[in-house]
Amino acid sequence: MDLHTLNSLNYEEFVKIFGNIVEKCPLISGAVWSSRPFASILELESSVCEFIDSLPSSGHEGLLRCLPDLAGKELISRTLTQESMREQNQAGLTSLSQSERETLTLLNSQYKLKFGFPFVICARMSDKKKIIEALRSRIQNDRVEELGTGIAEVKKICHLRLQDIFFKTSPARL
Amino acid sequence: MDLHTLNSLNYEEFVKIFGNIVEKCPLISGAVWSSRPFASILELESSVCEFIDSLPSSGHEGLLRCLPDLAGKELISRTLTQESMREQNQAGLTSLSQSERETLTLLNSQYKLKFGFPFVICARMSDKKKIIEALRSRIQNDRVEELGTGIAEVKKICHLRLQDIFFKTSPARL
């Protein structure tokens, strides 16, 4: 998609295409449509990040609570969003050994119990081994630190989803 | 659901049950989970309203852009959420005459073109005749006024969706 096309989308087209750049938060893409025209893709991405930063702390927690567990029950029941499915697949989370799956399930549960939101990491910038290591390490952090790290990871996920839309989208999707 | 049950829900259960009290905005129910324990249902509802009020103007616009048109293409294609389907059905929007449907489609388009967000009204507190009258009237307003009215209607819709969960939910849903 080129900039001219981007800036000529009405809000319905925009939310349809960008509605899941932040997992299950079409409110955010709906909000950034108000900032058009965008001078660049980077400017669109900055608008998303600024909107996220403007949310209160409870909003950051709410945003993280929209994300699925890695290798969790939504992966098993095949109810992940298309984007999440692809990301978890690329990170090798659809081909875990039984031991790896049990480790992840246990650590995810402990993390959620400690922090009240799920462990979030940009899976496509990682792999199953690194994800388990990061989870083991980050679960030691304090809550404020983890909230910040989770939101930073959401922004990385958003960056890659935007790249996909701009550089890999088939004409049919537009 | 009683208060004890409400306050003992973990965030995943809470977002599953309350995730669509504001249409397609699980971020909001995820955020208000942070305010538990709730002393009453009213306090939960107040937390939702306070969170909505805390959003910047673009966030209010983004929130409205998550709502479907009344008697629009999502009703025809049966892709409305369960809650929206029920509301549009109760207001008689599933049994419009051809003339009523054409009028609503035209007015909805004009409204969206003027304001950049959809016409939002609490359908269950209205009916198809009153909805068409309200749309004819509100399309004359200015943008700031309509943004405020739209958000006030979202809060009414949320109120009724909460009432449904607390007073009409079958045990199976919990």
Image: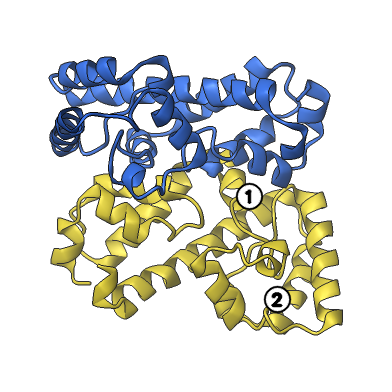
Chain colours: A blue, B yellow
Tell me if residue B105 comes above or below residue B11 in the rendering.
below
Q: Measure the C-alpha gap from mark 1 to mark 2.
A: 19 Å
For disc 2, the marked residue is B131
Instruction: Mark yes or no: residue B31 visible.
Output: no
**Residue A23: image location, x then y, percent:** 46, 37
As drawn, the label of residue B149 is none
For disc 1, the marked residue is B65
Q: Amino acid at mark 2?
A: Ile
Q: Nearer the viewer, residue A129 or A63?
A: A129
Of callouts 1 and 2, which one flags the residue occurring earlier in the amino acid sequence?
1
Q: Residue at x 29, y 70 (%)?
A: B173
Q: Nearer the viewer, residue B154 or B6?
A: B6
Q: Residue at x 53, y 20 (%)?
A: A159
Please state, as top left, top right, bottom left or bottom right, where the C terminus of chain A lies in the image.
Answer: top right
Q: Quadrant of residue B90?
A: bottom right
Residue B24 left/right relative to B170 = right
Instruction: Mark yes or no: residue B136 visible.
Output: yes
**Residue A165: image location, x then y, percent:** 65, 27
Tell me if residue A90 comes above or below residue B133 in the rendering.
above
Mark 2, secondary structure of its residue: helix
Q: Amino acid at mark 1?
A: Arg
Q: Residue at x 46, y 19 (%)?
A: A156
